[in-house]
Image (cartoon, rainbow, N blue to C red):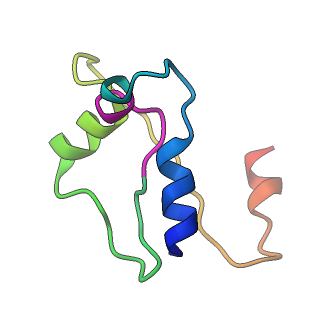
Amino acid sequence: MSEILLKEMETVSIGSGKSEDRRHGARSFLLVDEQENLQVHDEADFVEKLGCVDVAGVKVLSIFGNTGDGKSHTLN
């Protein structure tokens, strides 16, 4: 991933503007890098990055595919 895009991702915040809040309990984070390497080490790391450690259950939906495979149609 380009250095510019990574820098832009750091500055985007959905919630409060505090950097501490963005680091813990962020609404988005890099899950897979440009070489398709998973960026979380285990389930606990994934849940912590989602910011929902105290929630009993978490549902996650990921749709991967090439252009024209119908990903948007699947989500609708």
Picture coordinates of residue 28 (x, y %)?
Answer: 48, 41
Is residue 62 visible in the rendered image? The answer is: no
Picture coordinates of residue 64 (x, y %)?
Answer: 59, 67
Camera-side residue: 37 or 69? 37
Camera-side residue: 42 or 22? 22
2 vs 25, left or right, is right
Q: Eyeballing the image, is 18 above or below 59? A: above
Quadrant where the C terminus lies? Answer: top right
Picture coordinates of residue 59 (x, y %)?
Answer: 43, 34
Q: Eyeballing the image, is 18 above or below 23? A: above
**Residue 4 lies in quadrant:** bottom right
Is residue 66 visible in the rendered image? The answer is: yes
Q: Where does the magenta region start and end?
A: 22-29
Please state the total of marks drawn on the protein image: 0
71 is within the stretch colored magenta: no
Residue at horizontal 79 percent and vertical 55 percent from the top: 72
43 vs 11, left or right, is left
Camera-side residue: 8 or 32? 8
Camera-side residue: 33 or 5? 5
69 vs 2, left or right, is right
Picture coordinates of residue 14 (x, y %)?
Answer: 57, 28
Residue at horizontal 22 percent and vertical 16 percent from the top: 54
25 is within the stretch colored magenta: yes
Q: Main secondary structure of the magenta part?
A: loop
Residue at horizontal 57 percent and vertical 40 percent from the top: 12
**Residue 48 lies in quadrant:** top left
